[in-house]
Amino acid sequence: MSALTTAAPGAPVVELDLAELRRDPYPAYAELRRTAPLAWVPSVGRHLLTRYDDIVHAEKLPEVFSSREEGSLLLRTVGPNMLREDDPDHRRLRAAAEPPTRPRQVRDQWAAAFERTAHKLLDRIAGRGEGDLIRDFAEPLVAANLALVLGLRNASADDIADWSRAMMDGNSNYADDPDIWLRAERATRAIEEAVAEMAEVTRREPDGSVISSMVHAADPVELAEIQNNVKVIIGGGVNEPRDVFGVGAWALLQRPDALDRALKDPSAWKRVFEETARWISPIGMYPRQLTQDYEIAGVTLPAGSRVALVIASGNRDESVFERADEFDLDRPHRPHLAFGGGPHFCMGAWVARHEVSAIAWPLVFSRLKGLRLDDGATASDSGSAAGSLDGWVFRGLTSLDVTWQATA
Amino acid sequence: MPTVIFQLPDGTERKVIAVSGTVLMQAAVSGGVAGIVAECGGNASCATCHVYVDSAQAELVGPPNDVEDEMLDFTAAERRPTSRLSCQIHLSDALDGLVVHVPEEQV
């Protein structure tokens, strides 16, 4: 099967400007859902699938909507990995890597260290009275937590954050910029070395980390497979929890009632997390390639067709979520698509839920008294027009400037 | 071809004729049973296909496996003694007439 790089016969062709999509993709998605729920978008080189029900349908058919995409930038950046595999290979790798990310492991093995790191970062900034909650808190927190869960004791939080950024830039290097490739290659080589070292250490002394779990998997995993999959996890594992933290904090700082509720009833943080992930999904879309001819959203796609499942759009589908553009903790309970679905359901979901909703938000809002947004950091209620919100494949705040009462 | 019965939170019930050798979650999804979300597609990593097995049949169905037992501590609705993930209940003719209760919340 070779990848088709043109529109399927009968598919509407819709021109979308990538710069505009990065700035605010939601108006374009609303229009696509209304008029062309499966559309070929030349600037993206894929068919965009934008309605909730169609996305759920596709996610439940991994044998048709394959994760093996030819010409994938992710494959070029990190090499073969579980995100671009189907079962049974995907299952073998996932089963090897997953145990340390299950919820009981998160609670029993990692949570105390996550909390210590959060306190340490807050100790460092509490006396300042102002800062950028993304750069000064969220990013170093999630990067340090990721190093811990992966078992990269030989890497710093800064290393992890830098590597993640370099690889994410590679994954979206549609312009084929040689400098971006060079930075991504440097990062992936450094990860390979760090993983090889820790694989050797954990072969002798298992430590409950992802690397250790893969080294000792019942179904054998080779070193190169461990290296490539750690690269993928570093690529996604920083920006997603960081972005859900940032967007959720920003939403609450503009909604004192919702914040007050979460401060009085800690069980509400869980709702804040799920609603934030629905409202502005950290991952906006992911690619699939058809293994056979298949009709969806009124169009028959030939085998080889490239499709993007636009989960950010599904999460704003008015037929599923009333007043979908609004952030609303009381909306009727419907499952969102932010973690994806089917066999590739986000492996980091339980880690992210715990580090953000049980630790990061409660500590930030209880320790930084009088926390408020800097002038200029507010935005429209739809969350569409904030200056520092950026991205459509991945979307989050690039900065979150705030002030609080400095403490000694 | 076992028949399974889903008791829904609103008091109604759905009967689904399942295929032996498949899992209960698949019967729910193909039968369009509302309330069985099954985000992870049957890999015991999301805890969104939670059901309560009818207590009269709990022994017949058996206890959860280790991974499932862990996930059941993190379901959205409360865990009860007969809680199971429907993706881990393998159907056979021996389970014909199985009755399960679907909880209010999955996420």
Image (cartoon, rainbow, N blue to C red):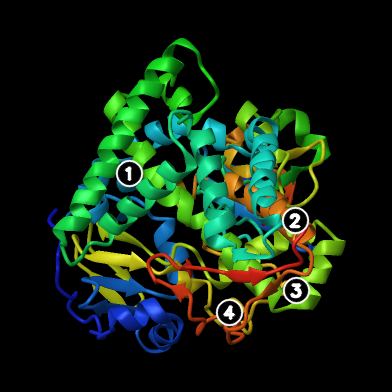
Query: Height in image: B106 above or below B47?
Result: below
Q: Chain of mark 3?
A: A
Q: State the residue at coordinates (48%, 28%).
A: A153
Q: Marks 3 and 4: which is nearer the front?
A: 4
Q: CA distance from mark 2 to mark 1?
A: 38 Å
Query: Height in image: A166 above or below A310?
Result: above
Residue B82, quarter of the rendered image:
top right
Residue A387 shown left or right of residue A5 in the figure: right
The percent position of residue A353, horizontal first and vertical second, equals 63, 51
Q: State the residue at coordinates (82%, 63%).
A: A263
Work out whether residue A279 or residue A196 is closer to the camera in this orientation and state it.
A196
Query: Height in image: B44 above or below A240?
Result: above
The residue wearing badge 3 is A330
Direction top: furthest residue: A204
The kind of residue tagged 4 is Ala
The residue wearing badge 1 is A86
Q: Are marks 2 and 3 in contact (CB under 8 Å)?
A: no
Which disc number belongs to residue A362? 2
Q: CA distance from mark 2 to mark 3?
A: 20 Å
The residue wearing badge 4 is A377
Work out whether residue A140 or residue A11 is closer to the camera in this orientation and state it.
A140
Q: Chain of mark 4?
A: A
Label 2, secondary structure: give it. helix
